[in-house]
Amino acid sequence: MKLGMISLGCAKNLIDSELFLGVAKKYDLEITNNLKEANIIVVNTCGFIESAKKEAIDTILEVTENKKDKIVIAMGCLVERYLDDLKKSLPEVDIYFPIKDYKNIDELFQKLLGSTKTYKMNYEDRLITTLPHSAYLRISEGCNNRCSYCAIPLIRGPFTSRPFESLILEAKYLAKCGVKEITLIGQDTTRYGTDLKEGKYLQDLLHEISNIPGVSLVRVLYLYPDEITTNSKFILTDESNFVNDISSKANKTTDEVINEIKNNPKVAKYFDIPIQHASNKILKAMNRRGSKEFIVDLIAKIRKQIPDVTIRTTLIVGFPTENNQDFKELVDFVEEIKFNRLGVFTYSDEEDTKGYLMKPKVSETTMKKRLNAIMQIQNGISNKLNHEYIGKTYSAIIDSYDSQANKYIVRNEAYAPDDVDGFIYATNDSGLKVNTGDIVKIKITDANSYDLFAKIIKD
């Protein structure tokens, strides 16, 4: 039998897909990318915001419309959150597999195949679906932050770090599989280790993984801003799961993280810091810890210590009560900070979150106008910053080859592997024979607001 999968949503969800596929292989199922020839089709859904939910529903409808004798399985965040509703509205799906049942995946496959074998999800049996030389390493589950717009704690539960040694073993496994770039992910990576008694934190994880033979680059995404420096203080609310013990441990994830990123040549000089807004009024309404002033000081500190750093962020426009003055503060902030990378989302009203009850709401029309205004400003900033790279040389990894354009698609440490940051297109007139996954030297020759253009050169 053959199994095909559609994985939607974030990289954290992708790892669940890879774990599922790893179990499927244990049960001797053939994995195929051709859904037409698959006997079993699995849709791993996202349920984070309205647009993601719509994509998930549309995908399920498309798969089930002409499924004939195929078995369709729906899993993931949307299923976890809306299981009963989905069973009623989409009975065409043969099996719903919510997150809470992942621990019993053997029962699912025993039912599907009539097997008596017992296999569980195992990180070291993951079927890597990313590029062979680049993979994600999920270092934690869940989240404690309780931002008032976010349903993730409702879906994924409280924050839980994975044991340090299990992560090192998985990283070694990835390296043995040929992975050169490992990207650490989690809903709140900065908090790693604060709930354990191991005395190991994010900086220790970065350092240890960077020393694994075969690993050329370690990257970390989703750094919560107020946990990066020693000056951070937790603002405890009655909604929080924080306790004083965790609060004190979080100070371990401090300047040491910045120092590790600064001083370790194998750690990408890259900070992904989801900020969400710059109006203190809106930040408070969002239940975000810290202020605009804190964020400005933090970014100035990082840039002072690491002048060539890349800083990426995400913003939300249209949060309930956001008025013209709040938006102007956000615009001024974006123009002042000049982020290397910036993404904007319109607010999504999510049931069972605090934001869902907040009023007044901002209209869809206004939200879209504000999003477009921010992106227009960022487009100009990115264009200017990208042109400053022209003439500079970097080490980069080759991701793929575009035969139509006769160019290689490469990334240096300023470009994450999630397709959010744009691309570097490189020609090769050097006479060097290169292949996907090779680390080469490039020189930037041109730029626009989203992509860089380069040529591969000899060392």
Image: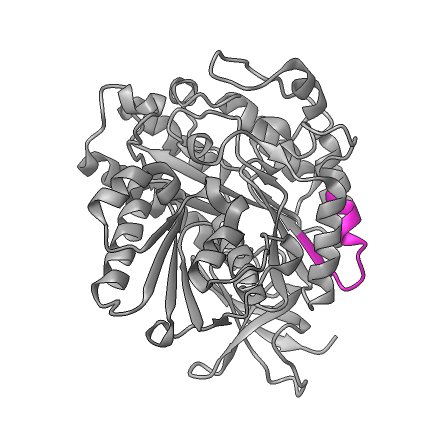
Q: Compared to 392, does 246 lie above or below?
A: above
Count the labels in the image: 0
Looking at this view, is 137 or 280 the one in front? 137
Q: Which residues are magenta?
A: 205-218
Question: Residue 454: percent from the left, percent from the top?
Answer: 56, 71
Drawn side of residue 423 relative to residue 310, left or right: left
Q: Compared to 254, does 58 lie above or below?
A: below
Q: Compared to 181, does 190 lie above or below?
A: above
Drawn side of residue 369 relative to residue 38, left or right: left
Q: In the figure, residue 231 lies in which quadrant?
A: top right
Q: Compared to 286, does 313 lie above or below?
A: below
Q: Quadrant of the N terminus?
A: bottom left
Drawn side of residue 200 relative to residue 141, left or right: right
Going 63% across and 60% down the picture, which residue do you hit? Answer: 125
Looking at this view, is 457 or 390 the one in front? 457
Question: Residue 106: percent from the left, percent from the top?
Answer: 53, 53
Going 71% across and 23% down the picture, which residue do you hit? Answer: 249
Q: Tell me if I can see residue 81 in this picture.
A: yes
Going 40% across and 31% down the picture, which residue do you hit? Answer: 150
Question: Does the magenta run of residues contain 213?
Answer: yes
Question: Residue 343: percent from the left, percent from the top?
Answer: 41, 45
Drawn side of residue 118 relative to residue 30, left or right: right
Question: Does the magenta run of residues contain 350?
Answer: no
Going 53% across and 29% down the picture, which residue do you hit? Answer: 158
Q: In the figure, residue 360 lies in which quadrant?
A: top left
Question: Residue 355: percent from the left, percent from the top?
Answer: 33, 23
Looking at this view, is 235 or 456 the one in front? 235
Q: Tell me if I can see residue 340 in this picture.
A: no
Question: What coloring was used for the rendering?
Answer: one colour
Q: In the figure, residue 459 lies in which quadrant?
A: bottom right
